[in-house]
Amino acid sequence: QVQLVESGGGLVQAGGSLTLSCAASGIILRLTDMGWYRQAPGKQRELVATVTTSLTTEYADSVQGRFTISRDNAKNMVYLQMNTLKPEDTAVYYCYARGFNYWGQGTQVTVSP
């Protein structure tokens, strides 16, 4: 059974930092590209960052230079380091295994002004 479990969300003041984690089970993480997406209230889900099996990364323009995606295949983990957070980063953040088309349940990130 495939499972992606996100953690690390919470409430933080603007300018602060959070690190999200995604624990994968039931899949071999090294075989799939992984991504972080987010969905704010009333908005569509959007891509935040991706990391391929060859460790190539891509970021949305809105987070470039502030967020860093990484993966640890040995631990079956994917991370999203978020720095200099802004109120507009407030959203539910989802982990996505592209090769399996599977989503996690999401973790809430709230950034106060």
Image (cartoon, rainbow, N blue to C red):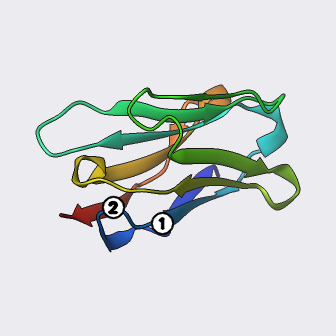
User: Split into 4 quadrants, where in the image is the C terminus?
Assistant: bottom left
Task: Characterize the local packing of mark 1: few (<14), some (14-19) or many (20 or more) Cα atoms within 10 angstroms.
Answer: some
Camera-near label (1 vs 2) is: 1
Residue furthest to the right in view is 74
Q: Which residue is mark 2?
A: 109
Q: Amino acid at mark 2?
A: Val
Q: Amino acid at mark 1?
A: Leu
Q: Which residue is mark 1?
A: 18
Residue 32: x percent and y percent?
Answer: 74, 32
Depth check: give the residue in front, 13 or 92.
13
Residue 2: x percent and y percent?
Answer: 63, 49
Q: Secondary structure at mark 2?
A: strand
Residue furthest to the left in view is 42
Residue 44: x percent and y percent?
Answer: 23, 30
Report, in whole angstroms, how far the alpha carbon at label 1 lies from the one at label 2.
9 Å
Q: Residue 71, which numbered label?
A: none
The mark total stands at 2
Asked if residue 3 is positioned above or below residue 44 in the image, the reply reads below
Asked if residue 48 is positioned above or below residue 105 in the image, the reply reads above
